[in-house]
Image (cartoon, grey):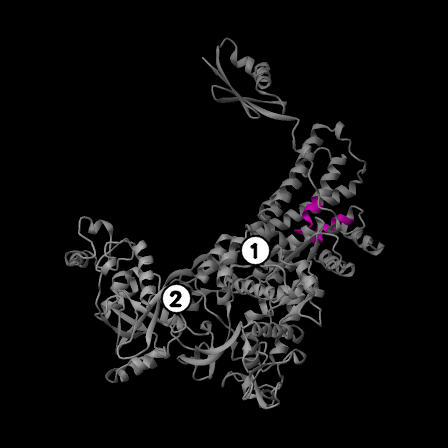
Amino acid sequence: MTENLKAKSNDIALNKYSPAAIEEKWQKTWAELNLDHTPTNNNKPKFYALSMFPYPSGSLHMGHVRNYTITDVIARLKRMQGYRVLHPMGWDAFGLPAENAAIDRGVPPAKWTYQNIAQMRQQLQRLGLSIDWESEVATCSPDYYKWTQWIFLQFLQAGLAYQKEAAVNWDPIDQTVLANEQVDSEGRSWRSGAKVERKLLRQWFFKITDYAEELLNDLDKLTGWPERVKLMQANWIGKSVGAYLEFPIVGMEEKIGVYTTRPDTVFGVSYVVLAPEHPLTKRVTTKDQQAAVEAFITEVSNQSELERTAEDKPKRGIPTGGKAVNPFTGEEVQILIADYVLYEYGTGAVMGVPAHDVRDFKFAQAYDLPIEFVIAAPADVDGFDLTPASETEEVTQLIQIEYNEAYTEPGILINSGQFTGMNSVDAKAAIVKYAEEQGFGKERVQYRLRDWLISRQRYWGAPIPVIHCPNCGIVPVPDKDLPVQLPEEVEFTGRGGSPLAQLESWVNVPCPTCGTPAKRETDTMDTFIDSSWYFLRFTDAKNEQQVFDSAKTNNWMPVDQYVGGIEHAILHLLYSRFFTKVLRDRGLLNFDEPFARLLTQGMVQGLTYMNPNKGGKDKWVPSHLVNPVDPRDPQTGEPLQRLYATMSKSKGNGVAPEDVIAKYGVDTARMFILFKAPPEKDLEWDEADVEGQFRFLNRVWRLVTDYVAAGVSRKKAQLADLSKSEKDLRRAIHTAIKSVTEDLEDEYQFNTAVSELMKLSNSLTDSDCKNSPIYAEGIHSLIILLAPFAPHIADELWHLLGNKNSVHTQTWPSYDAAALIADEITLVIQINGKKRADIQVPSQADKAELEKYARESEVVQRHLEGKEIKKVIVVPGKLVNFVVG
């Protein structure tokens, strides 16, 4: 360190704790020293610490502060423990908000985005995070999305990218496709307010279903992930083993294919339902039903997928007039269409078994459809003849009377031909086998997971790098022509589909293969594509020749600790796992999973005021408009409810990080964030607790500055000659080292680690051996242990002690197990279970010795004089109890 820096430290030492001056100084110093630069040598073990990168909205919120502080503590600890650490940051910068800003503000999306990036980068740097900014990436930068496009072409070459017609949400006013999230609960466009239609468009997909089984099975490898996240992914993939069955259509050669996990109920099928969009719908509709069916299809097309599948809405349907044959019974059943069946799910058709499915039961009752019970509870058919040849009308009547709702549990088959009398578990296998033998069905493994629709009819995203040629079909853009850059001369109106499709000078290009006039693909990619591989680019962020150097990436990956919100538990994390496996299979990676350990931090909640008599957004009353002593609605005067809720603009309960930092400093904000709650739990913001952490840092400041001012000698301690006070203090020091280390390495219990720092601070404050070398050891240890949590004040205090290097370059301390063993313990003496005294005894004393010490004590002799001891109970290390007559 420079002499000038030492002089500044000495000046500050004479004053009270001043966070602003200290933090500005040390952030500048760390930058000059390149302390956070990623090492290039491989002579140390690696540690990759990563926070989920943010969308550059322009303002940092407390959720960001919590996320990045957690990761920063881990990164700083690992450097001090001797690891080479990669701790990068970037920006998930494509997406609809920037395009909306262009429409609303009249500025190009790129300008708005890069302004926000600059602002948020400055805010992050103000937090003193040990980020290697030389590894920074922004997904909207051509030098990043060039490689996003290159990866797309890898998927295309592997047969994992394809185009097909798919039903989408279509805004008829703005003439554009909407994501489900852009459609409100009433099925209207979030921007235009128009009733959304369902429309078939050619869309690009990634074949994630090819990896469904591996994505499911490899969850077992993720031992460092929360169980609930793995369960959420398993449920999303949704593996089920069932049967694919075909129902012939009366009068046609075609058959309706359905998938069911309950083949044991197939004899109870009383109708078949097609999705309105199913290609067979028009073909099976009879002339007399045509007008009604077309009207129903039009009505359903105005509903979003969310509306059609909502659990709380009644299911609606209409007969087509067509009929199908149940191949197991030979009986004809009606073919209907219904809003709850979606063409994109499964086969786009379902068999209706109302007796054994809750939804089908309600649907059948509403439309007066037959309900045939074919499974009964074992107790209900006990004593009946259930041989296949028997007449089971009596059983059927019993079931019809007893069951006034769907029976969905396993049971005994009735009215099921040769399978009657079998238990439903065995019957499943037998029925599937029979279907295979007869040629109208087979066993099938199916997944809830669908292929990933990646097309977006928007501007602000990575253009899909293909060209549509009338002669050659779909032609990949040659690698040498990447990136396909977004044109800048674009008009943003929010209407009329993709702005790219309207720019003829960009769309019309020659075919790279044959030279024929052709057209670019005008869809851009889902922004989840950008975030599905960014962690790989960080390992070699400035490589202009390759997506990344595989040797470097394989060396750094997988991410050792990933930190982010639980809201990304499914899509982002699943897509990232998918990308990793595909790129592995393309020979670019040598590992299966991208993230070894995952920490999903809780939300930051603020004190919130709600008017229970109002609805929607109006019920929230911003905190700054409320008198906390008597909280009332400033408009109506009605009493308000107080609660803690996730901070948001709509609730008016947010706390701006810059306000907290201006008042208390970064280190205090970090300490509060870490101390208030375990990282995986929600955190309730409380300024009183923030002040508590500020007071703690002030106590540490005074401890060290008083020590420096006292000019204590730094001679080495002779452990054999320590006094009891020194031994007690040394035990407190090494207990803190052990506890803080364990809290940071096992479950990241930052809150208990901070508590241990407070205990050590108290032990130093209360110590009566402040001139001892042991006290000096305690001061040094406290500062080093504090460094990952409150990095600025720790480095300042470290230099006040006369050290020249940064505290963040120090080796993390290890504890001395011998120091944890007390020479003496406090032994409780009881007589007939009632405490009479405490005495100090050697900690290694055995039972006999403990009893001897107790008997010889003045208190026992006085209380036992003239009394008979009937029993002595010795609990080693704790107490001796004399039972007397």
Q: Are marks 1 and 2 in contact (CB under 8 Å)?
A: no
The answer to whether 192 appears left or right of 676 in the picture is left
Cα distance in 3D space between marks 1 and 2: 40 Å
Q: Is residue 480 above or below residue 802?
A: below
Estimate the x, y position of residue 330 in percent, counting from the top left. 23, 69
> What numbered label is drawn on residue 381?
none
Look at the image and give the residue range highlighted in magenta: 782-799
Estimate the x, y position of residue 204 in percent, counting from the top left. 51, 76
Quadrant containing the N terminus in the rendered view: bottom right
Amino acid identity at mark 1: Leu
Residue 829 sits in quarter: top right
Q: Is residue 349 visible?
A: yes
The answer to whether 651 appears left or right of 516 in the picture is left
> What numbered label is drawn on residue 614?
2
The answer to whether 62 appears left or right of 323 in the picture is right
> What numbered label is drawn on residue 598?
1
